Image (cartoon, rainbow, N blue to C red):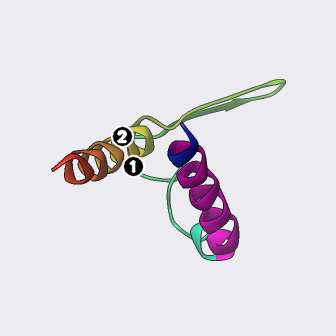
Amino acid sequence: MQKALIMIGIAILTIGLLWPWIGKLPLGRLPGDIAIDKPGFKIFFPVTSMLLISGLVSLVMWLLRK
């Protein structure tokens, strides 16, 4: 459990330090992301971004288990 918490902390620290560059990535603005913007109503479904991130996380987890 301690090892997992340390790894999560390192990951959060790394993301925080890299945030200025991560914010420039087109995630959330990819083709296939659904945005509905009407007067008084706004909703956003990042379908393509979620699939891409899920695939990357699955690949990393698979590589770490080998």
* Residue type, label 2: Ser
Left or right: 48 with respect to 29? Answer: left
Question: Is residue 14 in the magenta section?
Answer: yes
Circle 1 sits on which residue?
31
Q: Residue 52 or 11: which is nearer the viewer?
A: 11
Magenta portion: prevailing SS class: helix
- Helix, strand or loop under label 1: loop
Disc number at residue 54? Answer: 2
Q: Given the current orientation, which residue lies at the most extreme left position?
A: 66
* Residue 28 in the image, given as x and y percentages of width and height: 54, 49
Left or right: 37 with respect to 32? Answer: right
Q: Do the residues labelled 2 and 1 touch (CB within 8 Å)?
A: no
* Residue 55 in the image, given as x and y percentages of width and height: 29, 44
Instruction: Please report whichever mark, 2 or 1, sits nearer to the chain's N-terminal start.
Output: 1
Instruction: Write down the quadrant of residue 21 in the picture.
Output: bottom right
Left or right: 52 with respect to 12? Answer: left
Instruction: Write down the quadrant of residue 35 in the picture.
Output: top right
Q: Residue at point 39% right, 49% down?
A: 31
The magenta region covers 4-20
CA distance for labels 2 and 1 = 16 Å
* Residue type, label 1: Pro
Q: Residue at point 69% right, 65% down?
A: 16
